[in-house]
Image (cartoon, grey):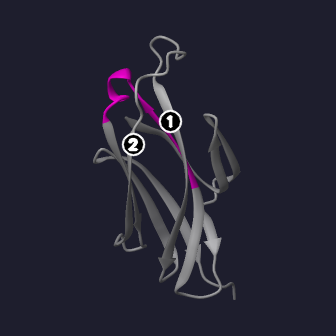
Amino acid sequence: MRVDWAIPCRYAEVNGGLATVVGAQVDAVRVADFPARVGTWLAVRLVFGDDEASSAHDVMLKILDPQLGEISETHTNLTLGPPNPEKAPGWEGSHLMATFVQFEASSEGTHTFELYVDGRHQQTLPFSIRGPSE
């Protein structure tokens, strides 16, 4: 299983196997003061082979501060079940996720979202946080 794409956005939801993504590619925010509670939605598409569909998988999100210190780590455990019988032969299966990511930023700079699947690094997403404009 691997991450096909991951998009920080203003809002995301998954319904009936389709994702609705609003304000795609939100990668910077300005806050009034520090520390600041910061949040964004994250839409993720995972792809996998038939042999991976019914085994358990761990999707992990790490959030790093500008000095690459870990702020938080969350895990989502997935077991997807048998492959979709309507999937075209030879195509990978897919699973969509939408999650709200929230964390405490103690300083401005580029924070990082690191996505892992089953312990393997998949994507790095920079997220810039800036203080008040002068």
Q: Position of residue 3 (x, y in %)?
A: 44, 40
Relative vertical location of residue 71 with respect to residue 20 in this rendering, above or below: below
Q: Is residue 29 above or below residue 120?
A: below
Camera-nearest residue between 47 and 123: 47
- Mark 2 burial class by Cα count in 10 Å: few <14, some 14-19, many 20+: some
User: Which residue: 43% across, 22% down?
Assistant: 83
Query: Does the magenta segment cover residue 3?
Result: no
Label 2 sits on residue: 78
Q: Which quadrant would the N terminus be assigned to in this image? A: top left
Q: Is residue 50 within the magenta segment? A: yes
**Label 1 is placed on what type of residue?**
His
Residue 12, position as x, y percentages in the image? 64, 51
Q: Quadrant of residue 37?
A: bottom right
Figure quadrant of residue 74: bottom left
Image coordinates of residue 18 in percent, x first then y, are: 64, 36
Residue at 47% from the left image edge and 68% from the top image edge: 111
Q: Secondary structure at mark 2?
A: strand
Q: Which residues are magenta?
A: 42-55
Vertical placement of residue 6 versus 86, above or below = below
Disc 1 from disc 2: Cα separation: 10 Å
Task: Determine contact: label 1, label 2, CB under 8 Å.
Answer: yes
Image quadrant occupied by the C terminus: bottom right
Question: Outermost residue, left direction?
Answer: 119
Q: Residue at x 45, y 63 (%)?
A: 112
Residue type at numbered disc 2: Leu
Q: Which residue is mark 1?
A: 95
